[in-house]
Image (spheres, grey):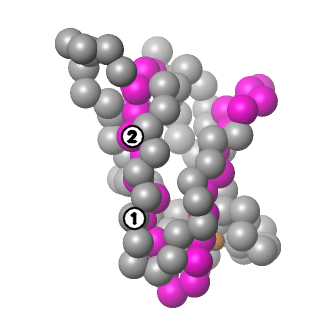
Amino acid sequence: MIAGAPPPARVQVVAREFSFVLSRQSIKAGWATIELRNAGEDAHDLRMQRVGGKRVYGWPVTQAGRVVDETFRLLPGRYILYCSVANHRALGMNAVLIVRH
Ligand SMILES: [Cu+2]
């Protein structure tokens, strides 16, 4: 990050069996800290990919009660979030985050 730059936007993603709930649905483009908070009982991770983009942003597998922050610089677009553990995505662990201009 650059000195004097605005602080990163923050989004909390709360994981449970089997859903993700985001603290906000959209943020401004630029630096963003996205927090995965596992409020469930099983282990979960988080993957995020911009629609039309190739990069897959990743959070490690996180045990119940744990929190993992990752900070990235995000371009505007529509980002798909999902859990890649077992079949959790199909069970409902997916969400959308909008990154605005
Ligand atoms: Cu999961």
In the image, what residue type sits under mark 1?
Answer: Val
Circle 2 packing at 10 Å, graded few (<14), some (14-19), many (20+), is some
Query: Which disc number belongs to residue 67?
Result: 1
In the image, what residue type sits under mark 2?
Answer: Thr
- Whether the magenta-drawn stretch holds residue 83 is answered as no
In the rendered image, which quarter is residue 61 located in? bottom right
For image coordinates 72% across by 70% down, the residue present is 85
> Which contiguous range is marked in magenta?
27-55
Residue 87 position (above or below residue 9): below
Q: Quarter containing ligand 1?
A: bottom right
Residue 3 position (above or below residue 31): above
Q: Nearer the viewer, residue 88 or 33?
A: 33
Residue 100 appears left or right of 94: left
- Which image quarter holds the N terminus? top left
Which residue carries the number 2 mark? Answer: 33
Q: Nearer the viewer, residue 66 or 22?
A: 66
Q: Position of residue 40 (x, y in %)?
A: 48, 81
Comes first in the chain, label 2 or label 1: 2
